[in-house]
Image: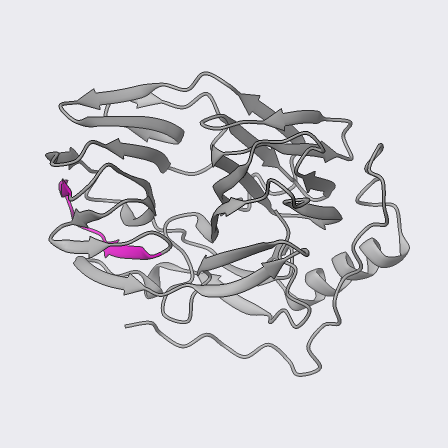
Amino acid sequence: MSNLDREAALSVCGGRGFVVAEPVRELLAPRKVKLGESTEVRRLLPNLGRRMVGAWCFVDHYGPDDIADEPGMQVPPHPHMGLQTVSWLHEGEVLHRDSTGSLATIRPRELGLQTTGSAISHSEETPKSHSRFLHGAQLWTALPEGSRHIDAHFEHHTDLPQVTAAGLTATVILGTLDSATSPGAAYTPIVGADLALADGTETHLPLDPDFEYAVLSMSGEVHVDGVPVLPGSMLYLGCGRTELPLRAASDASVMLLGGEPFEEEIIMWWNFIGRTQDEITRAREDWMTGSRFGDVKGYDGDRLDAPALPSTPLKPRGRVR
């Protein structure tokens, strides 16, 4: 998924100095962003109050959108570096193409995982023949220094492990939850899981006290540690938790995102993650003028131009709390 913001800001993220080391309940409001002509997303990360949750550094929630007579998601070829993209659907289909030659149609509860290394480009589009509704989330994880220059590759996993309890089915998208581990490649201690809860379910989910966590609501109403979390909002939970109380006030689904706090400070701009402003500048130049990011074969249309870089130097990030 691309960040299509034409006035993308340079921002510093990561670093343990900005992590809340105790359990908290911070409800994050989304920012609405247009993604092409017919898709509007709700951006939860990066947020004015919270930049990262573990290695998770970008979270968009979209839909459910009725696209029966619409083109749906149409994101032209665009570049990425220094991160992983995670595609997760509840309804609809997304066709992925990339510069390594990958071609895959991602469907509900299937993992589309793109590891960018130092350079990849890809497109995402709703197929011409598609379901009526489109509903899902697009997320990024930041790659640590030791992994951010690995060869770019794409994974499509259609069979993911699950953890079950009375009224709860948890599908493990990335990392490990309880004793279940996703087949998707992970480069930091991390967890991403889709939790489906039946109306009236009350349960306690085991957590790792060394991780920080957040919960993104996809549908229905779930009370997370006593806080009602409605679709399109996210509750940041901090660290130090061994379990998470959940109560479903309807049939509902949420995504649990967590991980060991990301120790390195990173710079995010547009669709790039680097370590210095010069590195970001070079990546933009390479996309606009060079061949570093490769070509996406088979996409019917032009690729996406990069926005202009901010004219002012990057400012140090202030503490969140």
Answer with left or right where residue 168 lies relative to residue 141.
left
Looking at the image, residue 137 lies above or below residue 89: below
237 or 136: nearer the eye? Answer: 136
83 or 266: nearer the eye? Answer: 83
Residue 150 image point, x, y percent: 65, 35
Answer with left or right where residue 170 lies relative to residue 55.
left
Visible in this render: residue 18?
Answer: yes
Colour scheme of the picture? one colour
244 or 143: nearer the eye? Answer: 244
Answer with left or right where residue 37 lies relative to residue 304.
left
The C terminus, quarter of image: bottom left
- Residue drawn 41% across and 56% down? 52
Question: Which quadrant of the structure image shows residue 269?
Answer: bottom right
Please give the range of residues in magenta. Answer: 233-248
Answer with left or right where residue 288 lies relative to residue 133.
right
Question: Which quadrant of the structure image shows residue 11?
Answer: bottom right
- Residue drawn 31% across and 20% down? 162
Q: Is residue 244 magenta?
A: yes
Residue 242 image point, x, y percent: 13, 41
Question: Which quadrant of the structure image shows residue 23?
Answer: bottom left
Residue 308 image point, x, y percent: 75, 72
Q: Residue furthest front?
A: 69
Residue 302 image point, x, y percent: 86, 49
- Residue drawn 83% across and 40% down? 294
- Determine the main secondary structure of the stretch shown in magenta: strand
Visible in this render: residue 152?
Answer: no
Q: Residue furthest top?
A: 159
Q: Is residue 256 magenta?
A: no
Q: How many marks?
A: 0
